[in-house]
């Protein structure tokens, strides 16, 4: 008798559970959908959404402000000083460019999209874009290289700077040597404690004779 009772109890349990589930399903049949059929349909991103970074390298002055602001050190910048005879031009915001930027890498795999690198940029050339689909199979492909200098350009810039530094050092050494020579040729100052030379005699007043 007990097993018959359990049998009908299980049937009741199964039917009532299905009924509860179907009640939830039917209640959602007539409400508007909140999902979209991605990737065929895409939601419009908010205006200030933070996604993939982009650097307009033509406007970068190599000041390193963005790298210093980054909390996870995912921006790597190297610069080479331009020599006096090189004109690197100006940015679109009017700043004169004085540094070559042979390396500007962002490891986007480390980036936490905080946006702290964007605000200190004096030329507004590093920015968040609305691109959010950039997955890769190889994580090395997530290191973005923004510099456009090829190795030959980098070598040339380094050589020019080295030559200019050597010329400046040679000029400085020559100036120091000339100053030392001039100092050596000057008459020596009177030794401390020596008797000062007597004052020349004053001419007698002709009216007293
Ligand atoms: S968004 Fe934040 S974490 Fe990403 S590069 Fe900029 S400062 Fe670094
Ligand atoms: S703050 Fe701007 S100008 Fe300075 S190095 Fe970064 S991207 Fe270039």
Image (cartoon, rainbow, N blue to C red):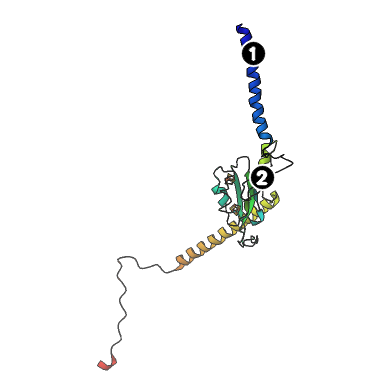
Please tell me which residue is depicted at 27% across the width and 93% down the height of the picture. 207
Residue 106 locus on image (x, y percent)? 63, 45
Mark 2 or 1, which is nearer the eye? 1
Residue situated in front as seen by the camera: 77 or 116:
116
Please tell me which residue is depicted at 66% across the width and 56% down the height of the picture. 58
203 vs 67: above or below: below
Alpha carbon separation for disc pair 2 and 1? 66 Å
170 vs 197: above or below: above
Q: Is mark 1 within 8 Å of ligand 1?
A: no
Residue 115 locus on image (x, y percent)? 58, 48
26 vs 114: above or below: above
Q: Secondary structure at mark 2?
A: strand
What residue does disc 2 label?
144
Residue situated in front as seen by the camera: 12 or 58:
12
Q: Quadrant of residue 125?
A: bottom right
Neighbour tally class for label 1: few under 14, some 14-19, many 20 plus, Cα within 10 Å: few
Residue situated in front as seen by the camera: 135 or 186:
135
58 vs 207: above or below: above
Residue situated in front as seen by the camera: 188 or 24:
24
Q: Quadrant of residue 184?
A: bottom left
- Image quarter where the N terminus lies is top right
State the residue lying farthest toward the left: 208
Q: Seen in the image, is 173 located left or right of residue 97?
A: left
First-in-chain label (2 vs 1): 1
What residue does disc 1 label?
8
Residue 12 locus on image (x, y percent)? 64, 17
Q: Secondary structure at mark 1?
A: helix
């Amino acid at each position: 008798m007990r097993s018959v009772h359990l049998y009908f109890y299980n049937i009741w349990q199964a039917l009532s559970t299905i009924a509860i589930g179907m009640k939830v399903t039917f209640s959602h049949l007539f409400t508007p959908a909140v999902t979209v059929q991605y990737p065929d349909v895409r939601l419009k991103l908010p205006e200030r959404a933070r996604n993939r970074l982009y650097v307009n390298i033509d406007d970068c002055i190599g000041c390193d402000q963005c790298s210093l602001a980054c909390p996870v050190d995912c921006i790597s910048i190297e610069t080479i000083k331009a020599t006096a005879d090189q004109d690197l031009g100006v940015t679109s915001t009017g700043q004169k460019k004085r540094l070559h930027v042979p390396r500007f890498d962002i490891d986007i795999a480390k980036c936490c999209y905080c946006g702290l690198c964007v605000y200190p940029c004096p030329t507004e050339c590093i920015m968040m874009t609305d691109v959010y689909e950039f997955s890769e199979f190889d994580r090395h492909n997530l290191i973005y290289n923004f510099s456009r200098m090829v190795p030959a350009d980098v070598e040339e810039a380094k050589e020019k700077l080295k030559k200019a530094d050597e010329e400046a050092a040679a000029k400085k050494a020559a100036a120091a040597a000339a100053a030392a020579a001039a100092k050596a040729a000057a008459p020596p100052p009177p030794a401390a404690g020596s008797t000062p030379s007597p004052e020349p005699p004053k001419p007698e007043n002709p009216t007293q004779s």
